[in-house]
Image: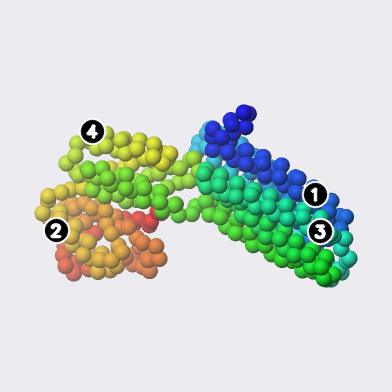
């Protein structure tokens, strides 16, 4: 069938789901708007416009998935994958705007309440609306997890928020039908609160990948495991992950290997690891070799000394890329220090602290330290 072509690619999934969202929300907004205008219920009219705004956000998502599917070009060498995040940003912004407008209208209705013309048919339609949005939200969430889509996650949150919002509207209708009490304006305030909360939550989730959030820990651990499982690898550090969209992830990593390993051997091992990371995670990886000296007594003693000094300063500090070179009557210890998050000392203070302790133990030695602040 024609729709099967959509399920061949990640972008096809997204486009199909976005199209389904457009159809469902057009139907719901039209029915609710008719009922709201006939009954005069501001909460129903607001709910209708909320669904109508969802048509726009679904259309934006559809455009976002289409743009993100475009291949890299001269101006965008990393592809167009972040267009999907921008689509999700519009979804969140739309929720916030609708919520703010509804809040204003609801307060007006509280100040000047009107008689409502609603019945059990109205209640039935709203109930069907809740069911439709609930299943649409489940559909969004299922596909979002399947294709790892932040935009569809935001759309799923929007749908579930709509379910809560419409449920509140149903409560106001039930109250009017059975008790003759008009809580329409108050219900509208509650609906707007749900929408605004959902909008700001979605906004936070979308802004994270745009601003550069810490990568998924499962991906970090998976990358390190594949590399360190190679028998020639002694350790890894300086892992950096750049996200240009769910299918455009670029990774760089320093790999420690024995200094005695021949260059061609090391190159072959690194190439194999890069290919394995590509096939396992669908990422583009660049690995850098750091040679590690082994079996040299003087080297080992100086390295142990540097590690001991760092541990005295803070046990969370670790070093790599360690080298020892002659310096006047002593040695230069050249190495990198991995600095953890929320470390209280500045780089300058840490360098001075280490240098002072080193001179106390070995007056002729000096340290040249490069500081690595963790990205993963």
Nearer to us of marks 4 and 1 is: 1
Residue 314, position as x, y percentages in the image: 29, 67
Question: Can I make out residue 255 in this image?
Answer: no
Q: Earlier in the sequence, mark 1 or mark 3?
A: 1
Secondary structure state at the residue bearing disc 3? helix
Q: Which residue is mark 2?
A: 301
* Near-viewer residue (363 or 80): 80
* Residue 372 visible at all: yes
Crowdedness near tag 4: few (<14), some (14–19) or many (≥20) residues, C-alpha within 10 Å? few
Give the structural element (helix, strand or loop) at label 2: helix
Residue on which the image places disc 4: 264
Q: Disc 4 versus disc 3: distance between alpha carbons?
A: 79 Å
Say whether disc 2 or disc 1 marks the residue closer to the N-terminus. Answer: 1
Residue 78 position in % (x across, y down): 50, 38
- Residue 308 in picture, x, y percent from top left: 21, 64
Spatial CA distance of label 3 from label 2 is 84 Å
Q: Residues within 10 Å of mark 1 (few under 14, many from 20)?
A: some
| Residue at image coords 26%, 50% | 235
Residue 120 bears which disc, if any? Answer: 3
Q: Residue 250 in the image: x percent, y percent? A: 43, 42
């Amino acid at each position: 069938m024609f729709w099967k072509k959509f399920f061949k690619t990640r972008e096809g999934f997204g486009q199909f789901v976005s199209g389904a969202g457009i159809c469902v929300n057009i139907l719901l907004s039209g029915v609710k708007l008719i009922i709201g205008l006939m009954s005069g219920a501001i909460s129903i009219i607001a709910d209708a416009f909320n669904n109508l705004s969802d048509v726009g956000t679904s259309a934006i998502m559809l455009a976002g998935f289409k743009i993100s599917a475009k291949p890299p070009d001269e101006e965008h060498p990393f592809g167009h994958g972040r267009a999907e995040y921008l689509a999700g940003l519009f979804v969140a912004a739309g929720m916030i705007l609708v919520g703010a407008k509804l809040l204003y209208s609801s307060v007006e209705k509280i100040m000047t309440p009107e008689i409502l013309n609603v019945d059990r048919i109205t209640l039935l339609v709203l109930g069907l609306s809740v069911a439709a949005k609930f299943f649409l939200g489940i559909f969004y969430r299922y596909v979002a997890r399947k294709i790892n889509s932040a935009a569809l996650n935001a759309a799923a949150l929007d749908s579930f928020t709509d379910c809560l919002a419409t449920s509140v509207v149903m409560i106001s209708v039930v109250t009017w039908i059975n008790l003759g009490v008009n809580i329409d304006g108050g219900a509208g305030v509650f609906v707007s609160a749900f929408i605004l909360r959902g909008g700001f939550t979605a906004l936070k989730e979308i802004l994270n990948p745009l601003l550069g959030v810490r990568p998924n820990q499962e991906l970090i651990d998976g990358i390190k495991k594949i590399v360190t499982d190679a028998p020639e690898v002694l350790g890894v550090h300086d892992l950096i992950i750049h996200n240009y969209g769910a299918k455009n992830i670029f990774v760089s990593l320093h790999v420690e290997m024995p200094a005695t390993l021949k260059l061609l051997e090391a190159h072959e091992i690194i190439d194999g690891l890069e290919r394995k990371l590509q096939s396992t995670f669908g990422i583009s990886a660049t690995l850098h070799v750091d040679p590690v000296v082994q079996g040299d007594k003087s080297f080992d003693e100086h390295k142990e000394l540097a590690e001991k000094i760092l541990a005295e300063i803070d046990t969370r500090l670790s070093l790599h890329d360690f080298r020892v070179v002659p310096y006047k009557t002593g040695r230069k210890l050249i190495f990198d220090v991995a600095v953890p998050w929320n470390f209280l000392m500045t780089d300058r203070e840490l360098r001075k602290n280490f240098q002072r302790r080193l001179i106390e133990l070995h007056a002729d030695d000096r340290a040249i330290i490069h500081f690595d602040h963790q990205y993963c």
